[in-house]
Amino acid sequence: MREGWGDRPLDVPRHPVADLAAARRAKLAEAFPDDRLVLPAGTYKVRANDTDYRFRPDTAHTYFTGNQTSDAVLVVEDGESVLYARPRSERDTDEFFRDRQYGELWAGRRPSAQEISESLGIEVRHVKDLPSWDDDRKTRDVTKDEDLARVADELRLVKDDWEVGELQEACDITALGFEDSVREWDRVREFGERWIEGTFFRRARAMGNDIGYDSICAGGSHATTLHWIDNTGSIEPGRLVLLDMGVEGHNLYTADVTRTLPVDGTFTPLQRELYDLVQAAQQAGIDAVRPGVPFLAAHNAAMAVLAHGLEGMKLLPVTAEEALDPESKVYARWTLHGTSHMLGMDVHDCGRASADIYPKGELAEGMVLTVEPGLYFQEDDLLVPEELRGIGIRIEDDILVTADGNRNLSASLPRTSADVEEWMGRLR
């Protein structure tokens, strides 16, 4: 088995992020000039017995290298960077035909160290040569060191033009996945939530890397469960279906989009009234997004609209203004969650940044965030009329902060009730 093999290099072009990643590493090193910085990619995780989940590298590792191979470690020290990686096996060992996890004949051909280095523009050494470091220098591991994790996330808050392009592509593919689902509406009606999940996943895998998170395909009252990912229910006439889905692109940037659709293709008068309220709240939130405003500006604008809407429906025990008081927030029984989170390589991006910067800080040009208000009336909520119970509506888009306001990266999907009905009628 070790003999008679030809040389077959991989064609690995220079990665478009190589120069950007080098600049990112320089900024990270500046924040910790006296320390050794370690950013592992991670390894495989067992799914069942001897089968693993598909590998997805640690976000910080890939952001600062572009590398997506498993078992690699970035080390930044004295302003220099080395990527310790696990390249493909040489033919003088048995690994290439015996190892079920890394062997080429089992798991596919990994790039060589030279190929990785040329693609990413970084020195590469074999991971078996990773030092143990028994010196006095402080070693910070991004998976364990809170300060390093914080700075790494804060450096990712503002996206450069290349990242914006990656997010736009993820949103565009996501829109196609939503369209696929509606085009197969007869099958959706027959097989239920599972059909939507599978249909969207097909598009994500065909044009991207994966889904960015488990799809939420919530028919009827399942929509009132915020993270309904079982997707085992039926799609019933006369009800709504809430679809929260996003494609992760080849460079791991993900979209995060939600639409709530009438199963019959047309909203009932009550459904339209509720949907239009949520859409008005979302538009108010989007309109509030611009540089220099608090991150929470979109949330506050959206909640003001919803609170007044709930007051108009005579559901609040106090006035809308009283409900909006931070000491009350009684409206939150039916809104449940915040309106926005940062978006990027993680669907809930930059979560380890300092709270003073996010979420308590201000928006800046280049940040990308979701705007996603919702109304949720639980099946067993005795404080609302019976006809509202079991209805959940959320509308979500991905918003880039621009120099003079914002741009909706997912705007190709319809949002108004009339546009949703026209869109469904055209595709079904």
Image (cartoon, rainbow, N blue to C red):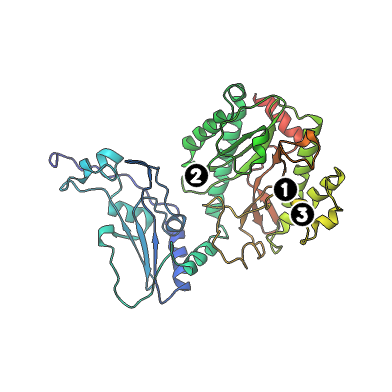
Q: Nearer the viewer, residue 56 or 338?
A: 338
The reply to whether discs 1 and 2 touch (Cβ–Cβ < 8 Å) is no
Rendering quarter of residue 126: bottom left
Q: Nearer the viewer, residue 224 or 285?
A: 224
Say whether residue 280 is left or right of residue 33.
right
Residue 270 x, y percent position in the rendering: 80, 33
- Mark 1 vs mark 2, foreground winner is 1
First in residue order: circle 3 vs circle 2: 2
Q: From the image, which quarter does the N terminus lie in? A: top left
Residue at position x 78%, y 45% from top?
A: 280
Between residue 330 and residue 281, name the one nearer to us. 330
Q: Which sits earlier in the primary sequence, circle 1 or circle 3?
A: 3
Query: Circle 3 sits in a helix, a strand or a loop, which is it?
Result: helix
Q: What element does badge 1 sit on?
A: helix
In-image side of 56 versus 9 (left or right): right
Count the marks: how many?
3
Q: Is residue 357 above or below residue 118?
A: below
Give me the disc on residue 335. 1
Q: CA distance from mark 3 to mark 2?
A: 31 Å
- Give the crowd class for mark 2: few <14, some 14-19, many >=20 residues within 10 Å: many
Of badges 3 and 2, nearer the viewer stands 3
Disc 1 residue type (three-letter): Thr
Q: Please state which amino acid type lies under the numbered disc 2.
A: Gly
Q: Which mark is residue 249?
A: 2
Disc 3 residue type (three-letter): Ala
Task: Quickly name the residue at label 3.
Answer: 301
Tell which of 274 and 166 is nearer to you: 274
Query: Residue furthest toward the left?
Result: 3
- Residue count near mark 1 (Cα–Cα under 10 Å), binned few <14, some 14–19, many ≥20: many
Is there a contact, CB below 8 Å, between mark 1 and mark 3?
no
Q: Position of residue 221 (x, y in %)?
A: 67, 35
